[in-house]
């Protein structure tokens, strides 16, 4: 079919095409009047995923963050949240809703609260903005104001339930760690009792600061005193040398010569450092005491080794108890915290225009549908009832060459 033939068909069937288009347009207009409009109210919640936990300092990222977001999306439309929203809205005492519930299908066995919650679930959508931590809670209502009220109530219920879940989970974990801390404390007390009993029975004591037994500490102190005493013996040799120098200098120098006076002052300082003769005399006695203490430490080496092992066990159990108790404290703080990791980004506002139906889309679609149907009907009628409207139609129908065309008289 050539363009000329198609144009002639349009000219011949234009009334049908126009009538079909008008009919579809009227149908779209009537549909707009019959369809109940829906109004979408949106509430936004920011998930503080990149913010460290105020107690534990932990952060979520990667797969854990995606799983967390998916959980929050599902939680918003869960009955635990939606049911609380029904209570906030006061729908349980709405006479219109009660009448609708009483006229429901007999096969519907849900209770009134779940029936109301299902209405909110069916009209709620939760989306996540691309590459963001913002949840978009969308509720479709029959009018702008009710849509706004339900969206805000749903967001508030979600925040309250998230806080309640967080606190309940933290409380549960705190109770578990409390039991573990009690067991660790009992175990620590038993280990400490074992150490005390061993020290009493074997007459050995472990110092708590550096885990050294008392006898070994005493031996170390006595050895340090011996080193000091040995240093005193060296001073005696220096005094003898100074006395010889002073004697030689006195023979050639006067009594007020500066060099002689300096030698005498140095000898006086050495005498003060050397101490009395009685302290030097007790050096041999001190050495004997050091030897006896050393023998005592060697004799009790096995006992001291076992005591150190027992003390190590005490230290390990104390460390376990401290860590468990700290965990309990952390979860107690989480249970008392008011931070859910969720931040509402303002309340929902009443929408300015309905989200459904889209008037331009319906009108444009009905016009396009009417025009298309008119063209199809015109072509179908032309195929079923062919007519000759020009030389081209005659040639296409006969299939023989056209020699000439005689124009009719005007």
Image: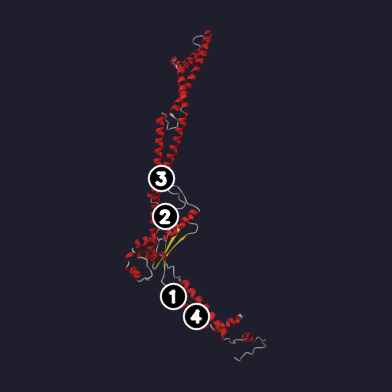
Q: Position of residue 314 (x, y in %)?
A: 43, 37
Q: Earlier in the sequence, mark 3 or mark 4?
A: 4
Count residues near mark 3 (Cα–Cα under 10 Å), then give few for <14, some for 14-19, many for 20+.
some
Q: Position of residue 244 (x, y in %)?
A: 52, 11
Q: Which mark is residue 180?
A: 3
Residue at image location 46% in from the left, 19% down from the top: 288
**What distance separates the C-alpha of mark 4 from that of mark 1?**
16 Å
Residue 40 seen in render: no
| Callout 1 secondary element | helix
In the image shown, does 362 or 55 lie closer to the viewer? 55
Count residues near mark 4 (Cα–Cα under 10 Å), then give few for <14, some for 14-19, many for 20+.
many
Q: To which residue does mark 1 refer?
A: 31
Q: Earlier in the sequence, mark 4 or mark 2?
A: 4
**What distance separates the C-alpha of mark 4 from that of mark 2?**
55 Å
Residue at image location 44% in from the left, 56% down from the top: 46
Describe residue 44's horizontal placement relative to residue 7 as left or right. Answer: left
Q: Earlier in the sequence, mark 2 or mark 1?
A: 1
Q: To which residue does mark 2 refer?
A: 343
In the image shown, does 357 or 233 lie closer to the viewer? 233
In the image shown, does 342 or 302 lie closer to the viewer? 302
Describe residue 1's horizontal placement relative to residue 165 as left or right. Answer: right
Residue, far front: 201
Residue contact between numbered discs 1 and 3, judged by CB atoms under 8 Å: no
């Amino acid at each position: 079919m050539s363009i000329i033939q198609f144009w002639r068909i349009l000219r011949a069937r234009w009334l049908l095409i126009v009538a079909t288009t008008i009919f579809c347009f009227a149908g779209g207009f009537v549909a707009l009047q019959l369809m109940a409009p829906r109004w979408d109210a949106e509430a936004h919640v920011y998930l503080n995923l990149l913010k460290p936990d105020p107690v534990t300092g932990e952060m979520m990222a990667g797969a854990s963050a995606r799983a967390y977001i998916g959980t929050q999306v599902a939680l918003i439309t869960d009955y635990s949240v939606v049911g609380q929203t029904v209570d906030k809205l006061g729908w349980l005492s709405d006479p219109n809703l009660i009448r609708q519930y009483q006229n429901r299908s007999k096969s519907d066995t849900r209770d009134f609260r779940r029936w109301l919650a299902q209405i909110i679930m069916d009209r709620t959508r939760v989306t996540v903005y691309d590459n963001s931590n913002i949840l978009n809670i969308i509720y479709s209502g029959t009018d702008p104001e009710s849509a706004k009220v339900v969206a805000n109530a749903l967001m508030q219920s979600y925040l309250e339930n998230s806080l309640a879940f967080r606190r309940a989970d933290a409380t549960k974990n705190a109770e578990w760690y409390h039991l573990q801390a009690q067991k660790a404390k009992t175990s620590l007390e038993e280990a400490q009792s074992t150490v005390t009993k061993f020290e009493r029975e074997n007459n050995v004591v472990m110092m708590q600061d550096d885990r050294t037994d008392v006898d070994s500490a005493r031996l170390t102190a006595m050895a340090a005193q011996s080193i000091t005493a040995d240093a005193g013996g060296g001073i005696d040799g220096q005094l003898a040398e100074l006395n010889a120098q002073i004697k030689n200098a006195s023979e050639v120098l006067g009594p007020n010569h500066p060099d002689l006076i300096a030698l005498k002052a140095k000898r006086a300082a050495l005498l003060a450092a050397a101490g009395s003769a009685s302290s030097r005399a007790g050096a041999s006695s001190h050495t004997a005491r050091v030897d006896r203490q050393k023998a005592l430490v060697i004799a009790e080496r096995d006992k001291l080794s076992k005591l150190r092992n027992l003390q190590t066990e005490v230290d390990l159990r104390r460390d376990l108890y401290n860590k468990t108790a700290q965990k309990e404290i952390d979860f107690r703080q989480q249970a008392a915290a008011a931070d859910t990791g969720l931040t509402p980004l303002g309340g929902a506002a009443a929408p300015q225009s309905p989200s459904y139906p889209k008037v331009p889309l319906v009108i444009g679609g009905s016009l396009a549908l009417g025009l298309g149907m008119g063209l199809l009907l015109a072509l179908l009628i032309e195929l079923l009832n062919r007519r000759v409207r020009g030389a081209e139609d005659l040639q296409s129908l006969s299939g023989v060459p056209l020699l000439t065309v005689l124009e009719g008289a005007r």
